[in-house]
Amino acid sequence: MPFELAEPRSLREAIASLDAKDPSVRPISGGTALMLMMKAGVLRPSRLVSLGKLGLAGIRTGPGGELRVGAMTSLRTIEKSEIVRKGWPVIARTLRTLANVRVRNVATVGGHLAHADPHMDLPPVLSALGARVTIAGAAGERSIPVEELGTGYLETSIRLDELITLLEVPPLGGRSAAYLKCTTRSADDWPAVGVAVSLDFQGDSIREASVVIGAATDKPTRLAAVERILVGRKLDENLLDEAATQELSVEGDLHGSAAYKKQLIRVYLRRAIHEARAQSR
Amino acid sequence: MRRSIQFRLNGEAVSAQVAPHETLVEVLQDAFGLFGARESCGQGLCGCCTVVVNGRAVSGCLYLASFAEGGEVSTIEAGSRLDAVQEAFIECGSLQCGFCTPGFILMTRQLLEEHPEPDDDTIRHYLSGNLCRCAAYPQIIEAVKLAARKMRQT
Ligand SMILES: Cc1cc2nc3c(=O)[nH]c(=O)nc-3n(C[C@H](O)[C@H](O)[C@H](O)COP(=O)(O)OP(=O)(O)OC[C@H]3O[C@@H](n4cnc5c(N)ncnc54)[C@H](O)[C@@H]3O)c2cc1C
Ligand code: FES
Ligand code: FES
């Protein structure tokens, strides 16, 4: 597989090395997903543009208390970060069972979010938390919700000559968040379903609810009907069961059939809500 | 399109001619005759290809050799004497064919750096990305704990 490896030193140079019309020119961050795609023969790049020398790694909090993570920050660095553990524990917990230590040492959050495999663990969590990414291109920067990144299986709204540069996660504030990953083989396998919830409890009722499911369809999906049932009243689990799968045309895969996944969603949605509630106390 | 890259390998400054697509395991084997890191699954799952780059374990089968440029690469071949982890693996009989052993040893060193007194859960979790087809897992877990004790004593 002959390709050229470009190693630009600045963001401007990196963007100029990309090609708005040629999908065989791709950015490479950790390369963990790209290497697998190349080995499987589904990607034959002509040029890979390495983002390793752009100074895009680092974690800090911004003026509004938001978490700011550079695109080249490794998943392992995020998992170990005190800032993340204290302020956004759901992210650190999610990372613990994402792949294995070696993959997390190398994989970056930018590559993770750009890859858009619907089985990935962070996109549902970050979508439920209302996170955004900054995307840079020749015309400048734009910021979009993580939720709007995925448009289909391995497809995103990032243009071929654009790059993710930054992830921003708003402070949790009064919300409590949980992510449950249901795997059908080992604990750190790809999920059969992933259920992310972010809930703002006020006593026994919920003021604001955000529920996003991964691995069930071709991209992470928000369960708006479930959110409506959750907000403003006491929890009715029977209503919830019905709403849990009505909006989704769940797709079966290696990790479970569609019928099985539907049942998993019902069960894991309840558990995720209970976990978030336990944390809020 | 080969180009020359420089890095430190097991403490020595080296250089190699690498093609853009070559992985770190390929270069260690072809250019340096080091076979401790070996490709098995080729997918990041089994840990047989473990190499330590700039102090962090990576799967050499998924890691572009070019990314090691200017870095510090360390393999199971580093050092001339057995360390506490290697001794423990031998004493506990933690291998049969030995194919997976270099990866387990390198990962165990990292595990013990982060968790000097790991419990079984921590060990299993940390090593979940390392597979042993001979299924020496119980002895491997014993060896990790023995190595931890040895390291605390010295
Ligand atoms: C063994 C194994 C197990 C795994 N298990 C899990 C799991 O359980 N859960 C899970 O969620 N994930 C899992 N993964 C996937 C893993 O999370 C991804 O491979 C990783 O996050 C990709 O990051 P990267 O930096 O290596 O991306 P790369 O491979 O470098 O890039 C991935 C894609 O994103 C593009 N890209 C990279 N950076 C940018 C950028 N800044 N802007 C725009 N486009 C960009 C690339 O062109 C490519 O298309 C697993 C992977 C492996 C190898
Ligand atoms: S050969 Fe690299 S992890 Fe299995
Ligand atoms: S000892 Fe044979 S694979 Fe582990």
Image: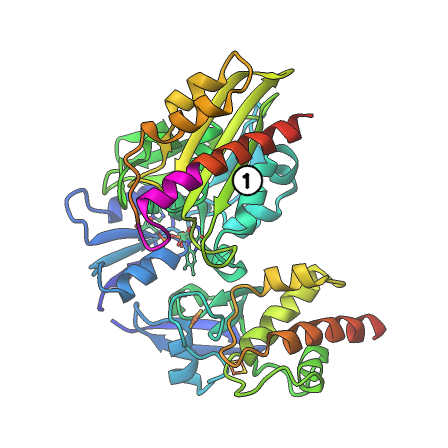
Magenta stretch holds residue A261: yes
Within 10 Å of the Cα at label 1, are there few (<14), some (14-19), or many (20+) other Cα atoms? many
Q: Is residue A166 visible?
A: no
| Image position of B59 (left or right of A26) | right
| Image position of B116 (left or right of A108) | right
**Front residue of this view, candidates A252 and B84:** A252
The vertical placement of A198 against A185, above or below, is: above
Tell me which colouring the rendered structure shows.
Answer: rainbow
Instruction: Give the quadrant of residue B63.
Output: bottom left
Identified at 33% across, 30% down, the residue is A148
Q: Position of residue A41 (x, y in %)?
A: 22, 64
Instruction: Give the quadrant of residue A151.
Output: top left
**Front residue of this view, candidates A252 and B79:** A252
- Quarter of the C terminus of chain B within the rendering: bottom right
Identified at 43% across, 17% down, the residue is A228
**Front residue of this view, candidates A251 and A16:** A251
Q: What subunit carries mark 1?
A: A
- Quarter of the N terminus of chain B within the rendering: bottom left
Q: Seen from this angle, which residue lies furthest left?
A: A21
Identified at 42% across, 43% down, the residue is A193
Magenta stretch holds residue A260: yes
Q: Is residue B1 visible?
A: yes
The count of marks equals: 1
The secondary structure type at the circle numbered 1 is helix
Identified at 23% across, 57% down, the residue is A47
Q: Position of residue B150 (x, y in %)?
A: 79, 76
Q: Position of residue A24 (x, y in %)?
A: 19, 54
Under mark 1, the amino acid is Ile
Q: Which residue is mark 1?
A: A91
Q: Position of residue A7 (x, y in %)?
A: 34, 56
Report the magenta residues as a range: A253-265
